[in-house]
Amino acid sequence: MKKIIAIVLTLMMVVALSACGGSVGTKMTMGTGGTAGTYYGYGGVLGQYIKNNAGINVTVVSTDGSKANIQGIDAGNYQLGTVQSDVMAYAWDGTRSFEEEGKVDSFRTVAGLYAESVQLVTMDPAIKSVKDLKGRSVSIGAPGSGVYFNAIDVLNAAGLTEKDIKAQYQSFADSADALKDGKIDAAFIVAGAPTPAITELCTTNSAYLVPIDGEVAEKLMAECPFYTVYEVPAGTYAGQKEAVKTVTVKATLIVNADASEDDVYKLTAAIFDNIEAITAENAKGAELSIENATDGMTIPFHKGAAKYFEEKGVTVAVD
């Protein structure tokens, strides 16, 4: 009889929790990036706030970045992902890094998060501009990755091609190690600044950022309008006495198109109702705002996110 009563009480608790929205809850896996990049650490912070405030159990995993996250959502392995705004445009249109696979439209936008600056880092004092990379050994990211296409875009804007450099295809962490060991001369790293891999380099070595500005930046933005100008503030890295001009794309949170409207509304609220607390844990939180979340997004928003932003007075495109 005691066992029967215990079972009945347990069932009653489950029903009661479900009725008030406090059941075990939705489980989501969030694809981020390499452990030395901003995606992984920041994704972990966002995942915790979503879990604690939306009741959605988020598992954050390290991945190869934007393309892998979009493919993971498409395959059903991930439900959330952090991606570059340019890469998700490639997926939606079936171009560049998605030319072989074709169009992928199984995801929707949740929100823009922060500026992902194109950071060209070196330890060679002779490298002062993008044009100085000619004939040098340069890491340009994994083939077909967002970093790869950003690097190619910048090189082309400077009048160079992939054949004009000794291209190396490395992750952020591998690039940092290769720079320290003198195996490469420079590396393109596209991530929110400060980026852990660059922070370590600048703290323990005489590394610095090379500007991407002037005619190079102007030509780049004219040919690829998803880039905008950006300055990495002075003091972002050890030894950086002045702001460094560069270009940027936007880190964006995406979600499986089939996710429920209620879940996506709650996870969006969990982030944007806790900006101050998130910023205290990760500096990139300072770039969270309704304007930044919705401005310049070319891919339709999920209806759950759109509902939240509508309540804040901003209408976004859905399909």
Image (spheres, rainbow, N blue to C red):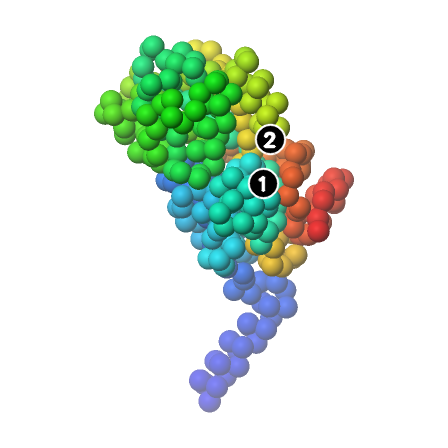
Where is residue 46 shown, x and y percent of the image?
A: 51, 44
Residue farthest toward the front in the current orientation of the protein: 163
Name the one closer to the observer, 140 or 263: 140
Among the 4 quarters of the image, the one containing residue 200: top left
| Relative vertical location of residue 52 with respect to residue 95 in this rendering, above or below | below
Residue occupied by mark 2: 226
Separation of disc 2 and disc 1 at Cα?
9 Å
Amino acid on which the number 1 mark rests in the picture? Ala
Residue 250's x, y, as percent? 56, 33
Image mark for residue 89: 1
Depth order, front residue of 262/209: 209
Which numbered disc, 2 or 1, marks the residue that appears first in the sequence?
1
Q: Residues within 10 Å of mark 1 (few under 14, many from 20)?
A: many
Which residue lies most toward the left here? 181
Please give the name of the residue rendered at 41% of the width and 49% of the height, measured from the top-left corner: 61
- Residue 87 in view in this figure: yes
Tag 2: residue type? Phe
Marks 2 and 1 close (CB-CB < 8 Å): yes
> What x and y, as percent, mark residue 182?
24, 22
State the SS at label 2: loop
- On the image, the x and y values in percent for residue 134 come to 37, 17
